[in-house]
Amino acid sequence: MEKPNMQNTQSLKLTGDNEAQKRQTLKQYFNQTWALYESLFDLIQQDDAYYLKAEPLRHPLIFYFGHTATFYINKLMLGKYLDVRVNDHFESMFAIGVDEMSWDDLNDTHYQWPSVSDVRQYRQQVKDVVNRVIDTMPLPLPITQESPAWIILMGIEHERIHLETSSVIIRQLPLEYVAPNPLWPECHDSGLAEPNQLIAVAGQKITLGKKESDQTYGWDNEYGNKTFKVADFKASKYLVTNQEYLAFVMAGGYQTAHFWSEEGQAWLAYTQATMPRFWRLREGKWWQRNLTTEMPLPLNWPVEVNQLEAKAFCNWKSEQNQSNIRLLTEAEWYILRQNIPVDAPDWHEVPGNIALAYYASSCPTNRFEHNGFFDIIGNVWQWTETAIDGFNGFAVHPLYDDFSTPTFDGKHNLIKGGSWISTGNEAIASSRYAFRRHFYQHAGFRYVESLQNPAQMAEVNVYETDELISQYLEFHYGAEYFGVANFCVNGVQQALSEILLSHTAKALDIGCSVGRASFELAKVFDHVDGIDFSARFIQQAYALTEQGEKRYTIRTEGDLQEFKSASLAKLGYQNEAKKVNFMQGDACNLKPIYTGYDLVYASNLIDRLQDPKHFLGSIGQRINQGGYLVIASPYTWLEDYTPKEKWLGGIKIKGENFTTLDGLTETLIGQFELVAVKEIPFVIRETKRKFQHSISEMTIWRKR
C-alpha cells in the first residue's frame, strides 16, 4: 500500500499571488485526498466486503469507492469543463447515493455492481483526467465560486466527507474483513473517566455565517448570516464518556419510554436497541468496536450515539439532577468555539483529536483543554438541538444544487466540532453538516443546562423565499390568471382525453419541477415517478408529500411580498401523495430502474435538454408496448441549454423551415405513431403586474 501524505489534511486557502504555486498546491491537495481515500479502502482485506450492506441505510462500499470519482466527472461535465465522459455507465450508477430518510425505509434495489478491479481502473482514469484539468484550466486568484478550481475543490471536499462516512461503514463490517494498519493508528490508552461537571458560560448575541470573502472553500449552507440571542448557560466540561453513558444504560434508560421522544420510541421499537451501535456485550463484559479492532470498553473515551440516544440521556440526566439538561445548540457551540482563536488552515499545532493529526480513533476526553473545556473540537462530532436550515442570503451553487436543500426539512440535526477523521472543510469552524436524528457518525455529545428554549433563540422563517422556487410553486399550485387553466392539471387532462390506456400501473413525469402534474397523474396511475434534474424543485415536491403543505412568498412589487400556501388537502391530493415517488435525476442519463411505464409525460422539458435526440432515442425503451409518450413544449430553443447543432427544430434545412414537430416526427416515427397534436396555453406570474403568457405544443405518441 502506497503511504499517503497524512499531513496535508487542512483545507486549502483560496488566496495567493502566484498562479503556478497555487496550481501546484491545488494539485497536491487533490492527489493527497485521493491517496488518503484509497488508503482507507485498503483496510478492507477481501473484495467480498465491498458488496456487503454493513449499514442498511446505505449502499455497499463499492458504491462509495466509485462515487467520489464520478462526482468529479459529472460536475466537470455539467460545468462544461469536459467534453467527453470517462464511463457513462459508472457515472450513472455511482452518481446519487441513498438518502438516510428513515431507519425503516431500506433500499432493497438490486444493482449489478462492477468488480473492485474495474472500479480501481476507473478511478485511475478519473485521477488522470482531473490532473490534466488542473494542469490546463485557467486559475485566476483568488479562487471564487465561478472558477473551475472551485469545482476541483468541490470534488476534493466531497471526497473528504466520504472519507468519514465510508469509515463509519467500514467500522460496521465484520472484523474478519478488515485489518489494522500503521497508517491508521488507533489509540490504546484507556481508563476510568474523570467526573463531568457543568461550567458557567456567559450568553451573548452572536451572528453566524461565512462571508464570501473568507479564504477557504465553503458549502452553500455555510454562507449568509443569522443572529441569535443566547442566554447564560452552563456546559459540560467534557464530552459525555462511555462511563457516564453506561450509567444511563445500566439504569434501564433504553427500556424507559418517557426518556425518549416520540421519534426515539419508534426507532427503539423498530431496532430493539439496548446500547450504542458500536458497543458489544459478551459474557458480562463490555467491548467497543473501533475502525478495525475491538477493545474493552474505554470508559474515558467519548460515547458515540445518534441524536435520539443523546436526547434520551439528557432527559434522564435532567430527572437525575432535577434541572433542565439538553443538548447544546449550534449558537451555543459557536460561543464555546470562541475559546479556540485560530482556525484551520492556520493551525501550527492541531488543537484537538481532529484531521487525523493524532489517531484513527477517539482518545480519552481529558487530552485537549481550552479555557476549562475539553474537546471543543475533535474526538467525535457533537450532536445539537438545531435542525439545519439556510442562513439569510442562502443560495445554492448551480453545479451542486442538492448538497444542502434536501436536509432543510426539520428532520436533519446539525453536528458540530468534527471528529478524529474530519479533514479539510469539515475541520474549519464554519462547516455545517447535518444528519437524520437516528443516524450514526463518529458522533457523541456534550450537554448544557439552560432554561432557554432553543426554538426561541432566532426567528424561524417557515416560508420559502427563493424567488425562482416560489415562482414555480405559484405556477403549479397557485391561482389561475386571465382565465387560463392551470397548465399542469389541464395538460394531463388534455393528454389523457386523447389516449386509450390498457394499463395504468406506472407513469413517469420527467422534468416534473415542483410536482403538480405528478399528483394529477396519480389520480389515474397506481404509481408515478416524478423526476427532475433540479434537487431544489424535487425538495419542494417531496416536502409537500411529507408535510402536506408548502408555504412560500411571491413578489408583488419591489420589496413587497404576498404569503401563499399550497395544501394537498385543499387540492384533493391526500390519497395521491402516497402513490408518487419524487427523485432527482438526469433525463438524458436515467438509471436503469426507471422503466416499464404505461405513460411518460415530458412537459416543458425537451427544449431544455443538452441532447434532446438522445433523450428521445432512449426513452422508448422505458415505455411498455402500446404505452404513450406525451411531449409538451413552447419550443423556446436557446443555446444556453442546447447546442444549436442539437436543436430538434426551429431551424432552416436546405433553405426550408424545419419545425420541432418535424424533428420529433423524424426521430420518433420508427418507434411511435403520432396520436394527436394540441396547443396548451400557460401563464407564469413574475410579479403582481408582470406575467409570461406562452403556448406549449403538445404531441401525443403511442409506442408501436
Image (spheres, rainbow, N blue to C red):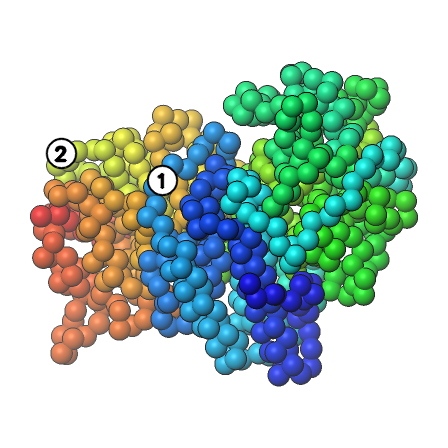
Q: Residue at x 55, y 53 (%)?
A: 43
**Residue 509, image x and y in percent?**
30, 44
Q: Provide the residue designation for mark 1.
A: 109
| Closer to the eye: label 2 or 1 | 1
Residue 640 visible in image: yes
Residue 237 is left or right of residue 667, and the answer is right
Q: Provide the residue designation for mark 2.
A: 502
Q: Earlier in the sequence, mark 2 or mark 1?
A: 1
Residue 551 is left or right of residue 477, and the answer is right
Dot 1 falls on a residue whose secondary structure is loop
**Residue 102, image x and y in percent?**
50, 33
- Determine whether label 2 and label 1 are within 8 Å by CB: no
User: How many neighbours does mark 2 have within 10 angstroms: few (below 14), some (14-19), or many (20 or more)?
Assistant: few
**Residue 400, image x and y in percent?**
50, 57
- Identify the amino acid type marked 2: Ser
User: How many neighbours does mark 1 have within 10 angstroms: few (below 14), some (14-19), or many (20 or more)?
Assistant: few
Q: Residue at x 83, y 34 (%)?
A: 192
